[in-house]
Amino acid sequence: MRLIVVGAGLSGLAVAHTLQSIAPQIAVHIIEKSRGLGGRVATRRREGATFDHGAQFFRPIDDAQQQFFTHTLPHDTLIDIAKPVYAFDATNRISIGDSAQNNEPKFVYRDGISTLAKLLRPASVTLSLQTRIQRIEATTDGYAVYSDTGALVASADALVFTPPAPQTIELLQTSTIDESVKNPLMIGLAPATYRPCLSVSLLYAGVFDPEYYALVNTDRGHPISWLAVEHAKHASRVPAGHTLLTAQLAPQASRDHWDSPEATLYATVASWVQSLTGHALGEPLWGDRQGWRYALPDGRADATAMQAFELSHGLYFAGDAHTGLGRIQLALTNGAAVATRIATHAGARI
Ligand SMILES: Cc1cc2nc3c(=O)[nH]c(=O)nc-3n(C[C@H](O)[C@H](O)[C@H](O)COP(=O)(O)OP(=O)(O)OC[C@H]3O[C@@H](n4cnc5c(N)ncnc54)[C@H](O)[C@@H]3O)c2cc1C
């Protein structure tokens, strides 16, 4: 059986990783539009600094997943961030955070959270990067997948879609899959709406070393929803004598500043950061931005609708649109569950 996985985020990689161990006879081809693996689990490097501009850390959902991170996968650069997450409100008042949550692990990797994606990549998988799937054609024996240049990328018996739901809907719309199949799928995906997030990283000269690793806005009244101190993950993340802070803007602030010129955006965020931390940070030496149009899901796709054409048509869906919560650990378990169904169905087809 030949399987195409659209997207090399954590759910797509979990599908491939799981299939490699439970159904190695399935030939998996992952097709990803970006230059690297990981999707929203992303790390950037700039002038000696390493920072995560998407997801910040992950937390095992149970002992088996904890074992997977700390034993099954290589773990020599795995870090449990020691400092806690504190809370803040619309008036910049900072308070001790949720102690129960702070007692749980906050895992990341020394050289960037995207290491997790590299560790999950199965050796046997075929991988096409920088290839955006634009259209899927149903053929007599499966599916043919075309890129945005119009080129045929690959053919397969079955497909797994992992992009955020609105992007998967766009892909289904342009595809020549029977309306009686794609229409109920698009309706099933519709409840999984997403909120945007503009992530802004600022490098400062001088060391700011608060007792917290990060601050989270708990009353949703502040333009910043999350502020992280990068060197609290590992000293090697930031050049000595410097501080790198990553601010994730709240949904409305993200929309308001989406198209702001970089200099204006960095000055605005720096003034918010200054007021929030209460620390004289000075002017940032540089800033970096990443806009995530589909950052975190607010709803969840209809599981019954999404699983209706798995066995009959070989159409599968994975990712956080199907968990309803933007969490790495859930994207992993969801991808593994989808892989288990694919393996079972592949057995049924033989
Ligand atoms: C700013 C931010 C902060 C977050 N913080 C945390 C956190 O601290 N902890 C946590 O657990 N989670 C966090 N999350 C959520 C977490 O990152 C996601 O829930 C998880 O990574 C989703 O994985 P996925 O595989 O479902 O989707 P994605 O990572 O979005 O993967 C989908 C992949 O499909 C690719 N793709 C899309 N369209 C196409 C196409 N047409 N052709 C080919 N490829 C395509 C994309 O490029 C992408 O690589 C955060 C997310 C964001 C954006």
Image (cartoon, helix red, strand yellow):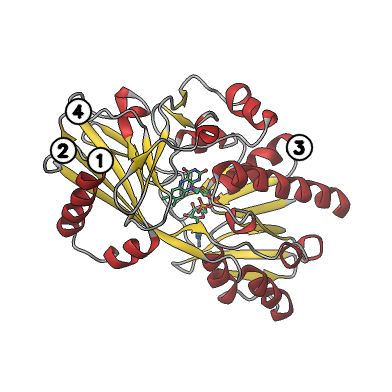
Taking the image as drawn, is residue 314 in sight? yes
Please report contact status of discs 2 and 1: CB closer than 8 Å, yes or no: yes
Q: Measuring from the top left, give residue 93's x and y in whole percent.
A: 31, 45
Q: Mark 1, mark 4: which one is toward the viewer?
A: 1
C-alpha gap between disc 3 and disc 4: 49 Å
* Residue type indicated by callout 1: Thr
C-alpha gap between disc 4 and disc 2: 9 Å
Of the numbered discs 3 and 1, the one sitting upstream in the chain is 3
Q: Mark 3, mark 1: which one is toward the viewer?
A: 1
Q: Is mark 1 on a helix, strand or loop?
A: helix
Query: Which residue bears the numbered disc 2?
Result: 281
Question: Does label 2 point to a residue whose CB lies under 8 Å from ligand 1?
Answer: no
Q: Is residue 215 above or below residue 348?
A: above
Query: Which residue bears the numbered disc 4?
Result: 207
Query: Which residue bears the numbered disc 3?
Result: 22
C-alpha gap between disc 1 and disc 4: 13 Å
C-alpha gap between disc 3 and disc 1: 49 Å
Q: Measuring from the top left, give residue 293's x and y in whole percent.
A: 41, 62
Left or right relative to 178: residue 292: left
Residue 184: give its label.
none
Q: Measuring from the top left, give residue 48's x and y in whole percent.
A: 23, 31
Q: Is mark 3 on a helix, strand or loop?
A: helix
C-alpha gap between disc 3 and disc 2: 52 Å
Q: What element carries label 2?
A: loop
Taking the image as drawn, is residue 292 in sight? no
Residue 277: give its label.
1
Quadrant of residue 19 in the image? top right
* Residue type indicated by callout 3: Ile
Left or right relative to 65: residue 211: left
